[in-house]
């Protein structure tokens, strides 16, 4: 395959980037060898390689060339070319020595590199066998990087994380929590959010690089908006979201048609979830409410109980009988559910 280096335009600087304070990068991508079998096993060894310079767009593209790889549209692959943005992701999670971090779609390992230099133990889940092999080889000299070749949307995340966290638990048996830091394919962002946010017993924070418009929708809790959807109720039920910074599309290869943004989700512990008699029936009710978005709730929720009962519940929750779903806060939905749904 011809070299892909000539496709890349100069990267525009990130307006909000901070000066890096992390140590030198563990291993330059230019040192990755080609031609290895994509399923080569991870070598667990305590030997450490000599730190080298940080990744840049040249080293990232050389790594892709070393495998004869071109980003696959079907996998939503857009590789980060600006090391300072990886630094922003890691800083947003406040990754420290000894932290356990889940990374989704490590690609060439540029973000993995920054996580390792921050002192983290990294579980990287990668669907592309060639990229999984590349990251395995790059960090083969470390016992703090494990690469799992799986589709994250079908991965047994809880099982993977429990095995790592259990090995790092203190003597009293208390299970510590991990963090998620990832530059994920835009086309699976909703699936990733839905899988991760209910795992507050495993993860304390989830830091994701998402499509900018999707990021704004996820963190916007304003009412009476056309963008107010069930996913907003879901996100706020399980987390406290925060939009961090916007990232220009020019920092990716290939360049996507949209900008990106870093979003931080501080996960709630299960004991701190809003009190509902059943989480399953709560979200079933929320989805039903939004299925008839312009309908009044007394109409869209008639399958749960008669309209007069819904009106009475709305009144008891200090809501007008003509309420529509986009007019209700998370707490409003919680109150309504507890009044009309029996389990």
Image (spheres, helix red, strand yellow):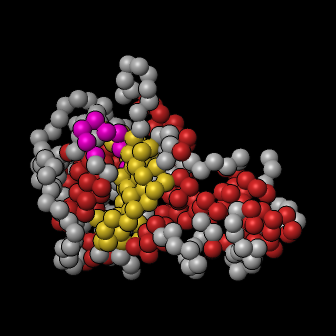
* Vertical comparison of 72 with 156: above or below: below
Residue 230 occupies quadrant: bottom right
Give the x, y percent position of residue 72: 41, 67
Q: Viewed as shown, does residue 75 lie left or right of 89?
A: right
* Vertical comparison of 311 with 161: above or below: below
Q: Residue at x 39, y 80 (%)?
A: 257
Q: Viewed as shown, does residue 229 lie left or right of 252?
A: right
Closer to the camera in the image, 281 or 70: 281
Numbered-mark total: 0
User: Does 124 lie within the magenta span?
Assistant: no
Q: Residue at x 43, y 64 (%)?
A: 185
- The N terminus - image quarter: bottom left
Give the x, y percent position of residue 87: 23, 57
Q: Residue at x 31, y 76 (%)?
A: 249
Residue 123 occupies quadrant: top left
* Vertical comparison of 74 with 271: above or below: below
Does any portion of residue 130 appear in the rendered image? no
The residues colored magenta run 95-104
Does any portion of residue 174 appear in the rendered image? yes
Q: Residue at x 13, y 52 (%)?
A: 21
User: Does 97 lie within the magenta span?
Assistant: yes
Q: Viewed as shown, does residue 289 lie left or right of 132?
A: right
Give the x, y percent position of residue 107: 34, 57
Give the x, y percent position of residue 45: 26, 30
Residue 110 occupies quadrant: bottom left
């Amino acid at each position: 395959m011809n070299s892909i280096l000539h496709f890349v335009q100069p990267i525009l600087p990130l307006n909000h980037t901070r000066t890096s304070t992390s140590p030198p990068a563990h291993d330059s991508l230019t040192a990755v060898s080609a031609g290895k079998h994509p399923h080569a096993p991870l070598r667990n060894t305590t030997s450490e390689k000599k730190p080298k310079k940080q990744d840049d767009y040249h080293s990232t593209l050389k790594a892709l060339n070393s495998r004869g790889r071109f980003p696959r549209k079907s996998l939503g692959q857009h590789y980060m070319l600006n090391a300072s943005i990886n630094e922003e992701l890691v800083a947003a999670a406040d990754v420290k020595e000894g932290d356990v971090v889940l990374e989704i779609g490590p690609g060439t390992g540029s973000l993995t590199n920054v996580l390792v230099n921050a002192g983290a133990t990294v579980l990287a889940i990668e669907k592309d066998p060639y990229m999984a092999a590349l990251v395995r080889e790059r960090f083969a000299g470390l016992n703090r990087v494990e690469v799992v070749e799986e589709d994250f949307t079908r991965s047994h995340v809880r099982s993977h994380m429990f095995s790592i966290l259990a090995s790092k638990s203190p003597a009293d048996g208390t299970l510590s929590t991990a963090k998620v830091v990832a530059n994920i394919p835009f086309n699976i962002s909703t699936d990733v959010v839905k899988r991760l946010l209910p795992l507050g017993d495993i993860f304390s924070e989830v830091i994701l690089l998402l499509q900018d418009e999707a990021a704004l929708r996820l963190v916007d809790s304003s009412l009476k908006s056309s963008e107010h959807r069930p996913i907003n109720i879901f996100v706020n039920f399980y987390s406290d979201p925060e939009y961090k910074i916007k990232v220009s599309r020019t920092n990716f290869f290939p360049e996507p048609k949209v900008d990106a943004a870093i979003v931080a989700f501080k996960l709630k512990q299960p004991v701190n979830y809003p009190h509902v008699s059943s989480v399953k029936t709560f979200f079933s009710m929320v989805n039903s409410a939004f299925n008839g978005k312009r309908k009044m709730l007394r109409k869209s929720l008639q399958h749960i109980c008669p309209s007069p009962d819904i009106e009475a519940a709305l009144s008891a929750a200090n809501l007008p009988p003509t309420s529509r779903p986009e007019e209700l806060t998370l707490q409003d939905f919680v109150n309504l559910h507890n009044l009309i749904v029996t389990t």
